[in-house]
Image (cartoon, rainbow, N blue to C red):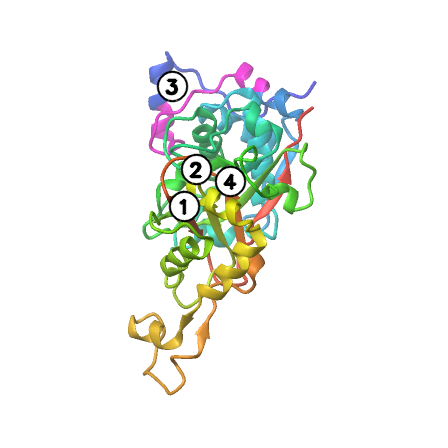
Amino acid sequence: MAELQSQRYDVQDTAAAIEFYYTKGWTDGLPVVPPTENSIWGMLESAGLAPQDEVAFIENRQVSVTAEKVAINTVMAGCKPEYMPVVAAAIEAIGDPKWGYHGPATSTGGSAVFMVVNGPIARELDINYGDNLFGPGWRANAAIGRAVRLTMRNAIGTIPGRLDRSALGHGGKYSYCIAENEAESPWPPLHVERGFRPEQSTVTVFAALAPHQVPNQLSNTPEGVLTTMCAFMRFSAGLRGQPQYALVIAGEHMAVMAKAGWSKDDIRAYCFEHSQASHAELKRINIMPGALQPGDDTTMHRLVETPQDFVIVAAGGRAGAFSAYIPGWGGKHSSQSVTKEIRRP
């Protein structure tokens, strides 16, 4: 039987262990759960992993992230063992070259790892997809998101002021994990759109800035709701554009879309067309350099490259006419969202 390889430390009690982790710089600023050999093995067994199994390889850092390291940080984050397969899949996803770890992890722009969990496991683990979607109150959301960030910190070295050069950052760097409201959504869920079967469980990772809440309590048509969202988005990316945007459509707005029979592709097409900004607008607010030129009022700058670059997720509270958009990190050809299957023994 394989053995754990990590160094062991003797401490007087739990309080001393918590303080010891602070002195070592292994926390995210909040107290952690001190891992024991039994709790680490519980995580590994839940995911069917051996300690030295490689979960991800971070090419730019030349770092192999082993299952043991992921398990330790998953314990520290306050996870139950049954959360470990989700965390392992998310770590696998951020190691994917398509996600491109080095850029979102080191940029001054302040990206976090936004995670969307789909499939049966989201319901089994009670991952929140409804009220207070991005707020506190759900252990699974908080602990799974936190486990990914602690693994980035302790196993890969993504530490603020060192590898992590965020100028501002945002709260999603503590935890940024939700589920999709598949039961009430009028649309195919995200993982099915990406080629998985409904009965499969997946996690999608997205290098993301903070969520931007969009209110529209006046409109009862998709065009009215989305016109407001596009107005909010139009200047949010600056000149670069973003590789992708996540659009989180909550209860009342989702009902408006469903009543009108709008599909996710209808929403994408409308937002692609109406989120473009003219060069004149961008120059007037000092996003685009240079003096105004003839034709600037009709020359348009696209927010994303294609309509499919809008990633649509049905989630949020049933009450309240609010939705949100989440800008992706980087320029047009930077990090892409990645979906991985959550595997359980």
Q: CA distance from mark 2 to mark 1?
A: 8 Å
Query: How many other residues sit within 10 Å of disc 3, few (<14), some (14-19) or many (≥20)?
Result: some
Query: How many other residues sit within 10 Å of disc 1, few (<14), some (14-19) or many (≥20)?
Result: many
Q: CA distance from mark 3 to mark 1?
A: 42 Å
Mark 4 or mark 1, earlier in chain: 4
Mark 2 or mark 3, earlier in chain: 3
Q: CA distance from mark 3 to mark 4?
A: 30 Å
Residue type highlighted by circle 4: Met
Towards the viewer: 307 or 32: 307
Location of mark 1 (residue): 323
Location of mark 2 (residue): 316
Location of mark 4 (residue): 115
Mark 4 or mark 2, earlier in chain: 4
Q: What range of the chain is rendered magenta? A: 20-42
Residue type highlighted by circle 3: Ala
Q: Quadrant of the N terminus?
A: top right
- Label 1 sits on a secondary structure element that is strand
Location of mark 3 (residue): 17
Q: CA distance from mark 2 to mark 3?
A: 38 Å
- Label 4 sits on a secondary structure element that is strand
- Label 2 sits on a secondary structure element that is loop
Residues under numbered marks 3 and 4 in contact, where contact means CB atoms less than 8 Å apart:
no
Residue type highlighted by circle 1: Ser
Mark 2 or mark 1, earlier in chain: 2
